[in-house]
Each structure stands twice: as structure tokens, then as C-alpha cells.
């Protein structure tokens, strides 16, 4: 055995939502904890997030009179997570036993985990407030409120409180609240410690980790278990190309998200799963182009394209998607393969002067600047012909720059008939907007789309569409597929213990968050669809590790 530099009952790798929940749960069970963070700042991607967490049947929603029946919640989660397997009639809804059991474990533990973290002072949540256009006075609709399985379309989304007047993403306050609680419990958070391997005893039990710090190797003993909450592999280009099913230009996850647990877990004998999936959104490409794939600017995130007269088109000048659909769903339109190309690899968000002049401060305004402000991500042109010229120049300027698993390759250029096709597209969209019925992509037909449209001039009953001015000026941002993070890695059981391919657990090894094979499958259930499962299974992992028997050297 090595000379141990630190010892604790539970060693937690990472410092984001999953890791902090694990540490808080372990300390709550009386265990000593040490946390290891590869970066120089604690908080992980949670610190950069929107701070929401999707928690079924939570106590705050119940206090408002909302109900969330278990059987229906499991059907909703199963339908979205495993759409090619889902069947509402069999006892396990068509899912393999483990996948079903993990969804059930999430439902059964999420609310109580949040309640305990509230009691401890690690969380101080509120229900995500109504932004002003919801039919419900308390909150906005769930992302998939229209599905028949969704019997609880209001109240599942919790969020961190933000100080009055704050313009920061609430994830900052979520992260700081959890970290402050851990510091108050004297949990060491060792920054700049990049975990490179786990250490096992003669019986194959994981009893510690090896970490690099300031060019030296450190050994940290875990007397009861190691919990990984170290993030996905969004910034490992080789893993993205090998595993993720779609071409990705950028990620807003922290750059330490390089898939350490995929490597370490695989070497330890873990089964790996869900590697082809991620949590997707669109980003304005010139920002990740400037940072080798890292999405840095807050206005580069395009969660819900702003404006009732805003459309998305591909290089052929054609609409390819419902612009108001949830970002995880909408972004997958970039992955469409047609014969020899990805025709929608890069998309162009186009809006008119009214949308540019609209003065509302809206949480999803994103790449559309407020009146009087400008952005280097936005192209302005007097005519469609000039817009095409300026788009082409911007594309040329990004050729050869380093993204993640996709680039602005030579065939990413506007088609020769882009302008005439775009003009026809605008005319067709305006016809739909005048009637309120989008015959191509059904824009505005779900409760979420209508509520998160924001301000609207429409008089048709479809708040999401208004005719786009046929005369300039026109505005445009160039968008590509990005990921909040990936969600594949070692497979866990319902107690968050890592499993081998034969379904037996690896003693002493646990995981939660984006570094594991997420129980969410290919779904993004709603706002906070990453952090809800991460915090819940992190909490389960911390409790499981803290309650485990002592592991001998």
C-alpha cells in the first residue's frame, strides 16, 4: 500500500451538484469526507448552470396542491428516456429491470433527498416562478406537459434563489449554497487534484484514489468508499467522436469534463453504458470557435430562440425544426444525416427589426441583444443578399478553427440558391403566422412553447408566431449543436454502486451525475433534467458509501 496523504471514510471526486450532494449525505450519516476537484475553482458545471433541478413529487409542489402520481411519472420518464422500448402496459413498461428500477429509485428518493438537504441547509429551493405567460399562477408548464403520461405538468422544477437584481445564472447560488454547507461541516475541498486512478486492496475492493497535484502524485485513502461525481466527457474530443451520436461544436461544461470516470471505471471492470447520449442545446458558434469548443459567453447559449418573428434555417435556406421546441429536442435536428452530408449541421437564426427592438428583459433572450446593445455574435444586413454575403464571410473566418467533434468543413457553405430559398421560406412562414397554424413543424402547439415565448404580437391564439418583416434590416446568429455535458459512463445500481457487466457491484465504488450511465437514458425530462437526477443519486451514493463496512488495506 502507498503512503497515504489523506484519509477519510468517504472520498468524493468532483465538486458539482452530484459530488456536493454525496458529500453532504455522507457527513449527515456521520462519515468523514474529503473532496477532490481537478479545477482551481470548486463548483464544476453546476456553478455555470441555470440552477434548476427537476424533482418529481417534491414537497414544495405538494404544498401548492399539485399531485404527481408515481405510476404516471414513471411512464413519462420511461417514454422519454427509452422511446424505442417504452410500452405502457407491462409491469416494467417494456424496460429492462435495471433501467426501470433506476427510474423508480429516482422517483422514490428524489423528494426526500431534497427535503433532507434543505433541513441540513445545503439547499434553499423555490419552485421555478411563473415568468408571466403561464396559465398557472405559480409556475410555468413542464417541457412535455402535452403528453398524456404527464399528470403533473406544474411544480416539478425547483431552482436556487437568486439575490434581487442578480443577472447571474442561479447555478452560482446553488453551488455556493452547497459548498458553504460543506465548509461549515469542515469538509476539506482539495482543489487542483486530478484523480487518475482508483486503488484496490487484495480483494479487489476500492479503498482509495491516486491524484495528480502540482506535478506530484497524491494518495487518498477511502475507508468506506469512493464516490465519483466528476462530470462527463464533453471536452475529450476522442471520446466525443467515438461515442456521441451527433456532431458537437461546443460545450458549456467546465473544461475538466474529460471523462476520467469512463477511463477509470472501465479499467476497474465496470460496465459502461449510455455513451451515445448527451444533454443538448444550441450555441452561437463564434464563441466556442474563440475558445476551442468551450462556450463562455452567457449570450452564446440559445435555449429558446427569442422573438415571435424568428426562424431557424439550414444552408439551403429551409426551416428544419420547430424553433420553439425544447433545446434538447431541437438541437438534435443538427444530427440529421442525408446521403452524404449533414444538411443541418450549421443553422442560421434569423430575426427582424421588431424582435431586435423588443425591450423585454427575458431569461431566454440569449443571443438577441437588448435594444441599444450589440454583440459580436450577431450579423446585421440591410437585405437578404447582403445577409448571405456576411454569413458566408463569417463561415469562412471560422474554417480551420478548433471546435470539439465537428468543424466548419469545406462543404459548410450556403447553397447557390440560399437567398431565393430563404425568401420563399419567409413567405411560407408568414402564411402560417397569419393563421396561427404551422403546417410544417407545429410550432406553438404545446403549453411550454406558448408560455416561454415571452412577449408576442400574435392575435391568432398561437403566441409563438408573427409574420417576419420581408424588408430589412435582418439579423442572424450562426448556431451549432452543443452539449451541456455528456451522460454516459459506468453503470450504477439503485444504491449508486458501480456494477460489473455481470451486474455484481464493485465494492467501494459509487457514482452519480454526468460521469455515469445516466438513468435519464436519452431524455431531458424538463428544466433541471441534469441536476435533478445528479443531486438525487449523489445523495444516494453518499449515504450508501457512508453506511458501508470498513474496507481493509
Image (spheres, rainbow, N blue to C red):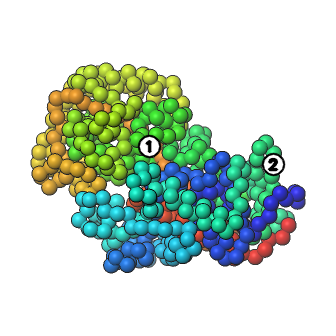
**Residue 199 position (above or below residue 430):** below
- Residue 186 in the image: x percent, y percent? 70, 66
**Is residue 358 something one can see in this rendering?**
yes
CA gap between label 2 and label 1 equals 36 Å
Which quadrant does the N terminus fall into?
bottom right
**Residue 171 position (above or below residue 391):** below
**Residue 160 position (above or below residue 250):** below
Taking the view exactly as shown, the residue that stands out farthest to the front is 164
Q: Residues within 10 Å of mark 1 (few under 14, many from 20)?
A: some
Q: Quadrant of residue 187?
A: bottom right
Q: From the image, tell me which residue sits under label 2.
A: 217
Q: Residues within 10 Å of mark 2 (few under 14, many from 20)?
A: some
- Residue 3 in the image: x percent, y percent? 88, 57
Choose the circle earlier in sequence order: 2 or 1.
2
Which residue is located at x 73 percent, y 57 percent? 268
Which residue is located at x 42 percent, y 40 percent? 300
| Front-most of residues 356 and 521 | 356
- Residue 414 in the image: x percent, y percent? 33, 25
SS class of the residue under badge 2? Answer: strand
- Residue 119 in the image: x percent, y percent? 54, 76
Q: From the image, tell me which residue sits under label 1.
A: 298
Which residue is located at x 56 percent, y 58 percent? 176
| Front-most of residues 367 and 426 | 367
SS class of the residue under badge 1? Answer: helix
| Front-most of residues 364 and 545 | 364
Lateral position of residue 441 relative to residue 98, left or right: left
Which numbered tag is attached to residue 498? none
**Which label sits in the foreground, 2 or 1?**
1
Q: Quadrant of residue 149?
A: bottom left
Which quadrant does the C terminus fall into?
bottom right
Amino acid at each position: 500500500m502507498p503512503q497515504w496523504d489523506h484519509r477519510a471514510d468517504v472520498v468524493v471526486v468532483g465538486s458539482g451538484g452530484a459530488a456536493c450532494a454525496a458529500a453532504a449525505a455522507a457527513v449527515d450519516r456521520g462519515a468523514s469526507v474529503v473532496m477532490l476537484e481537478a479545477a482551481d475553482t470548486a463548483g464544476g458545471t453546476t456553478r455555470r448552470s441555470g440552477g434548476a433541478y427537476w424533482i418529481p413529487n417534491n414537497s414544495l409542489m405538494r404544498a401548492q396542491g399539485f399531485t404527481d402520481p408515481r405510476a404516471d411519472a414513471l411512464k413519462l420518464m420511461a417514454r422519454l428516456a427509452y422511446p424505442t422500448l417504452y410500452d405502457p402496459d407491462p409491469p416494467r413498461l417494456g424496460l429492462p429491470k435495471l433501467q426501470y428500477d433506476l427510474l423508480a429509485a429516482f422517483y422514490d428518493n428524489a423528494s426526500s433527498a431534497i427535503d433532507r438537504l434543505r433541513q441540513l441547509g445545503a439547499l434553499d429551493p423555490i419552485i421555478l416562478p411563473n415568468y408571466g405567460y403561464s396559465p398557472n399562477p405559480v409556475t410555468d408548464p413542464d417541457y412535455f406537459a402535452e403528453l398524456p403520461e404527464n399528470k403533473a405538468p406544474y411544480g416539478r422544477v425547483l431552482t436556487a434563489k437568486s439575490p434581487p437584481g442578480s443577472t447571474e445564472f442561479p447555478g452560482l447560488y446553488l453551488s455556493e449554497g452547497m459548498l458553504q454547507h460543506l465548509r461549515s461541516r469542515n469538509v476539506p475541498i482539495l482543489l487542483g487534484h486530478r484523480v487518475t486512478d482508483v486503488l484496490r486492496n487484495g480483494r479487489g475492493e476500492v479503498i482509495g484514489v491516486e491524484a495528480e497535484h502540482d506535478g506530484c502524485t497524491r494518495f487518498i485513502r477511502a475507508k468506506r468508499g469512493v464516490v465519483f461525481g466528476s462530470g462527463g466527457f464533453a471536452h475529450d474530443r476522442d471520446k466525443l467522436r467515438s461515442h456521441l451520436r451527433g456532431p458537437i461544436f461546443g460545450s458549456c461544461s467546465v473544461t475538466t469534463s474529460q471523462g476520467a470516470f469512463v477511463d477509470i471505471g472501465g479499467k476497474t471492470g465496470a460496465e459502461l453504458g449510455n455513451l451515445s447520449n448527451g444533454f443538448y442545446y444550441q450555441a452561437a458558434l463564434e464563441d466556442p470557435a474563440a475558445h476551442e469548443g468551450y462556450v463562455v459567453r452567457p449570450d452564446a447559449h440559445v435555449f429558446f430562440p427569442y422573438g415571435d418573428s424568428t426562424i431557424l434555417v439550414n444552408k439551403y435556406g429551409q426551416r428544419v425544426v420547430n424553433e420553439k421546441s425544447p433545446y434538447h429536442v431541437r438541437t438534435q435536428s443538427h444530427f440529421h444525416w442525408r446521403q452524404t452530408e449533414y444538411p443541418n449541421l450549421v443553422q442560421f437564426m434569423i430575426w427582424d427589426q421588431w424582435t431586435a427592438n423588443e425591450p423585454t428583459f427575458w431569461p431566454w433572450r440569449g443571443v438577441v441583444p437588448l435594444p441599444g446593445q450589440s454583440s459580436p455574435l450577431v450579423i446585421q444586413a440591410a437585405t437578404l443578399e447582403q445577409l448571405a454575403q456576411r454569413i458566408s464571410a463569417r463561415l469562412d473566418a471560422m474554417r480551420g478553427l478548433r471546435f470539439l467533434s465537428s468543424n466548419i468543413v469545406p462543404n459548410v457553405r450556403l447553397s447557390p440558391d440560399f437567398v431565393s430559398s430563404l425568401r420563399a421560406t419567409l413567405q411560407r412562414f408568414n402564411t402560417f403566422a397569419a393563421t396561427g397554424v404551422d403546417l410544417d413543424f407545429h410550432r406553438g402547439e404545446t403549453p411550454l412553447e406558448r408560455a416561454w415565448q415571452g412577449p408576442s404580437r400574435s392575435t391568432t391564439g398561437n403566441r409563438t408566431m408573427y409574420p417576419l418583416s420581408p424588408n430589412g434590416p435582418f439579423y442572424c446568429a450562426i448556431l451549432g449543436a452543443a452539449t451541456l455535458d455528456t451522460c454516459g459512463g459506468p453503470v450504477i445500481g439503485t444504491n449508486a454502486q458501480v456494477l460489473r457487466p455481470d451486474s455484481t457491484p464493485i465494492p467501494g465504488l459509487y457514482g452519480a451525475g454526468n460521469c455515469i450511465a445516466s438513468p435519464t437514458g436519452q431524455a431531458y425530462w424538463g428544466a433541471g433534467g441534469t441536476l435533478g437526477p445528479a443531486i438525487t443519486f449523489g445523495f444516494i451514493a453518499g449515504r450508501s458509501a457512508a453506511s458501508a463496512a470498513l474496507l481493509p488495506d
